[in-house]
Image (tube, rainbow, N blue to C red):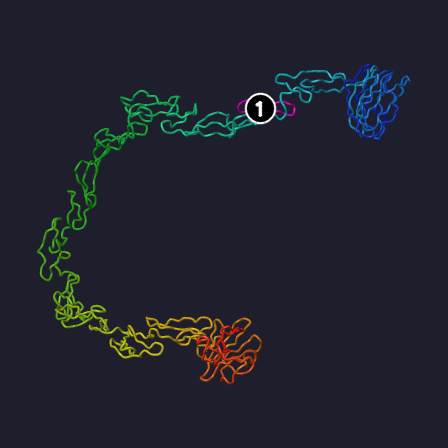
Amino acid sequence: MSAGRWILSFAVVLGCSTPGRDFGAENTGGGGSSGGSAGNSSGTAGLARGGVTSHSGGASSSGSGAGGMLAGNGGALAGGGGMFGGNAGTSTGGSDLASGTTSTGGTTSTSGGQVTASGGKGGMPPVDDGGAGAGGEGGACDQPGGCLECVPGSRCVGTKVESCVDGHWVQSQACSGTMALCIAGACAACEPGARRCADEANPELCNSKGQWEPAATCAGSAPVCRAGTCVTCTPGAKRCSGNVPETCAADGTSWSAGTACAGTTPACIAASASCGRCMEGQLQCSGNTTPQRCNAQGQWVDQTKCSGAIPRCLQGSCVQCDPLEGNGRRCGSEDTPQVCRPDGTWQNDTVCSGATPVCRADAGRCACVENTTRCVTNTPQRCVSGAWVNQPACSGDTPVCLGSGTCGCTNAAVRCLNGSTPQRCENNAWVSQSACAGDTPVCSAGSCVCRDGEQRCSGSSARLRCQGGTWVSDTACSGETQACIGNGTCACANGAVRCGSTTTPQRCQSNAWVDQAACSGDTPVCSSGICACREGADRCIGSAAREHCVNALWQSTTACSGANPVCYGSGVCGCQPAATRCDSPHALSSCQSDHSWATTSCDAYFACNGRNCTAGPGAPGYVSCDATHVCDVGQQCCYDATSSTGQCQAQAPTGTTCARNGNEFELDCDGPSDCASGEVCCNVAYMRFVTFCSARSACTGTGAAVLCNLDEGAQNNPACTTGQTCTRTTGVIPYLATCK
């Protein structure tokens, strides 16, 4: 934009109307922001003769420095000190439009300084692409239609309100008192958004114009206004919650409970929210005759004592009676009870009559006449202390309640007295009849009968039994008690025998069983009244012969033999203590002192020879194969030198099943005891390594040697020839020894 166009635009906005006035002091504008070097620029002619136009410097987007304002009639060009970012240049004023004269403008500074001229300090308004320049002071505007300072409106300057009057700012009001703030050009009472309380329950909120407006009234759980906010209570306030004093918290949001009132001060006093003996206005009685009222200090104060027609104190008031005193009753007359009502006044109760015709003074109730009697169905009653008391109900032999309040029998009824005397009821009283005796010694249902359950004999074994008062046939005596004696008792027949227990024979003597000598020894049990052997038991007859109990008699059975040739104890066969045997090629059994065999496994490379565990070469017929295997008679050992393990198998022709490679060996024998008389156990390198029984003369070939038993001595060993020594081999089979 050219300098001339910019000045014209600004003049139109502000409206120049007053001539000869200086508005420059109030005009301010922001500095420009476009960079570039300032050059020499010609200013545009002023709009009014003799007037000075003052504006803020604008920014030049083209890189040239912005020109100053033209001051007509010798006025100075005041540059706004725009921020151009280039070097300062000199601006030459344009010609006055009216006179054609030219004025020289001031100097423009890149640092935002002011261009000074005789016309005053100029400013530059904002341009299209620059910021606002710093304002300057204008010169006088002395032509009609000069520049205006403001447009109609108001503004705040501190706490003062200024209004635009005729284009000039004029102070119109100083804010003070309740309207001490200036906001948006008007005096205000508060800062927008502030809060306060109009009273204890009504908060107020400051609106955007700085005026207080009512907010929602505090109620419900937050009934108190505090700092403009509704809270639960006034901080520090006190109250009673039941018997617990409470204090409002410092922020007013909650009540804090204190110690509950108890003991001698159980009441919370509302006026002070403190504990006292009672609450103001409460009533009580001190004793039966003195009302008390609680004062404002929570203390009980005696009132006028009760007397005359209202002699009793009830709930703090004088009344006719106390319903809790005694039973709350009295007699108003001899047949009229009275009851004390809850309000302390006497009220007549139902008039006494019938079975309870009188009012009893000590109870205030209708009662029967003392010591009179009556019947209620079959129950006699007697009046005791004014009340009918049940006596034992009439029942059994006296089921009838008589008019006198006593019990009697039913006429013509019968019964038994003392178990032997029949009785009959006559005129409601029992009368004894003739006593029972003889075969009918017992009274039953008023008649004489036999004693139920008793027995008697009706022959040597026949019996009778009393059943239901009558004699009837009973089971005859038989078996071990076949004789009937005395009062029908079954007993044994003299001379009979039986077993009283499994070990005790018995004989009947004088019709009673008598124990005989107890069974023991070889006949320890009783059978059919005599001592006998125990069925299925055994016993020894000599060192090996045995007998077996069959049908209570001892009979011969199989004698002990074989591995268990000895009979001992209760006919049991066992081994001979200290005897030995082989249970397997590698297991030796020894007979213990209890005649049982105990088996022991032989050590590595040892075998059982029938007497003990010996090294393989000393066990006839057995070939030690490895640390855990011993081959039985008729077996050969296939030994693997790589794994030092062997396997037993049935003997085959020499060299046919084992020793097929350099690490396998075939052992048909491991010492002289495995071979027949006149033979030796020969070791040769035939088909790798083989041992077999042969004549000594036949033990020849590569590496041939005779195997010996080192347990028989190194020197003079029977398997070796003169000059040879029995020596442990150092080869791959560590338990063999050879003659060298």
Majority secondary structure of magenta residues: loop
Q: Which element is circle 1 on?
A: strand
Give the residue at x 90% y 17%: 99
Res 470 quadrant in image: bottom left
Q: With respect to residue 144, does 395 lie above or below?
A: below
Q: As drawn, is 120 to the left or to the right of 189?
A: right
- Between residue 513 and residue 307, name the one nearer to us: 513
Percent x, y for residue 166? 76, 16
Q: Is residue 590 above or below residue 175?
A: below
Expressed as whole percent of the image width and height from the top left, the position of residue 691 reads 51, 79
Q: Badge 1 is on which residue?
A: 196
| Residue 702: x %, y % from top left | 56, 81
The three-letter amino acid code for the residue at tag 1 is Arg
Q: Quadrant of the N terminus?
A: top right
Whether residue 12 is visible here, answered yes or no, is no
Q: Does the magenta run of residues contain 210? A: yes
Q: Is residue 60 left or right of residue 277?
A: right
Q: Residue 340: horizontal and vertical position, in percent?
A: 29, 29
Out of 500 and 189, give the one closest to the viewer.
500
Q: Is residue 731 visible?
A: yes
Which residues are the magenta region? 198-213
Residue at far right of view: 100
Direction front: furthest residue: 723
Q: Considering depth in this image, is 136 or 454 the residue closer to the camera?
A: 136
In the image, is residue 356 above or below residue 4?
below
Q: How many numbered callouts?
A: 1
* Nearer-the-camera pick, 171 or 468: 171
Mark 1 burial class by Cα count in 10 Å: few <14, some 14-19, many 20+ = many
On whether residue 366 falls in the magenta region, the answer is no
